[in-house]
Image (cartoon, rainbow, N blue to C red):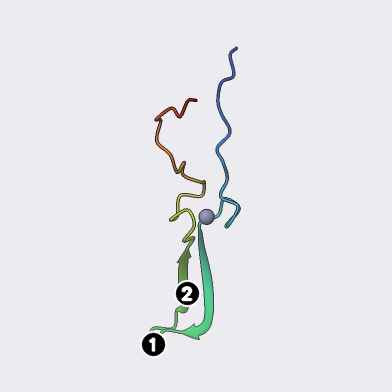
Amino acid sequence: MPQHTRPRQICPDCDGFPTVAITTGQTTPTGHRQTLTVTCRACHGTGHTTPARSHTRIGA
Ligand SMILES: [Zn+2]
């Protein structure tokens, strides 16, 4: 079997976990824990690095 599946480049900034829920320690008036969802700014929540260049081949 050909294995040409290229491993995705995991975002070095979030290590592949682009969204993290942070507990603020406070509770909402309804009694739920208040959490903040933080999205990795480096990969914009994709979890992997996006190629800066397009498929344009830069030769010579
Ligand atoms: Zn990231």
Q: Residue furthest front?
A: 60
In what element is the residue under mark 2? strand
Name the disc covering residue 29, or none: 1
Instruction: Judge by depth and name the residue closer to the eye, 52 or 43.
Output: 52
Residue 19, given in percent of the width and then of the height, sits at 49, 60
Name the image quarter holding residue 14: bottom right
Residue type, mark 1 in image: Pro
Q: Residue furthest top?
A: 1
Residue at left 45%, top 55%?
45
| Other residues around mark 2 within 10 Å, as few (<14) / some (14–19) / many (≥20) | some
Name the quadrant of the N terminus. Answer: top right
Residue at left 40%, top 36%?
54
Instruction: Judge by depth and name the residue closer to the eye, 26 or 17.
Output: 17
Instruction: Tell me if 45 is positioned left or right of 14 in this view.
Output: left
In what element is the residue under mark 1? loop
Residue beneath label 2, please? 35
Residue 26, given in percent of the width and then of the height, sits at 50, 85
**Label 2, label 1: how far apart the Cα atoms are:** 13 Å
Residue type, mark 2 in image: Thr
Name the disc covering residue 58, or none: none
Q: Is residue 26 above or below residue 54?
A: below
Name the image quarter holding residue 56: top left
Residue 47, given in percent of the width and then of the height, sits at 51, 50
